[in-house]
Amino acid sequence: TIGERLDGKIKHNLDLRETIHPLALLKAKKAFREMEPGDTLEILIGDPETRMDLFRVLTDDVQEVLCQEEVQEDCLFYRIQLAKQIG
């Protein structure tokens, strides 16, 4: 299930599947800024444009992309798991 991937190492979850593009980017940036270094975040995104722009917004803060996949459940969305830069 969401947030249980990577043996429970995901500390924060952000579901942006129903959020419009600019607001989704702002929420992701805010959530990442409030995380501690080394923390992990799972983001669910419905809009492909938001998925592409997310990495432009978080470029300096992301240490590692742990997972990036398309998921087809009721509708198509993207699951992205990131680790925040340490130090």
Image: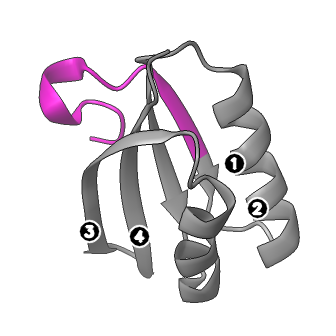
Rendered position, 61 above or below 27: above
Disc 4, disc 3: CB below 8 Å? yes
Observer able to see residue 72: no
Tag 4: amino acid? Tyr
Tag 3's secondary structure? strand
The span from disc 2 to disc 4 (Cα, nearest Å) is 13 Å
Give the mark nearest the N terminus, 2 or 4.
2
Q: Looking at this view, name the residue that lies furthest to the left.
A: 7
Tag 1: amino acid? Ala
The span from disc 1 to disc 2 (Cα, nearest Å) is 6 Å
**What residue would you read off at disc 3?**
69
Give the mark nearest the N terminus, 3 or 1.
1
Which segment is the magenta one? 1-14
The residue lying at 41 percent from left, 70 percent from top is 78
Left or right: 20 in relation to 37: right
Tag 3: amino acid? Glu
Q: Quadrant of residue 25?
A: bottom right
Left or right: 55 in relation to 9: right
The span from disc 3 to disc 1 (Cα, nearest Å) is 17 Å
Give the mark nearest the N terminus, 2 or 3.
2
The span from disc 4 to disc 1 (Cα, nearest Å) is 14 Å
Q: Is residue 76 magenta?
A: no
Q: Where residue 61 sits: x, y (%)?
A: 57, 39
Left or right: 16 in relation to 51: right
**What residue would you read off at disc 1?**
28
Tag 2: amino acid? Ala
Which one is nearer the viewer's eye here, 12 or 74?
12
Which disc is residue 78 wearing? 4
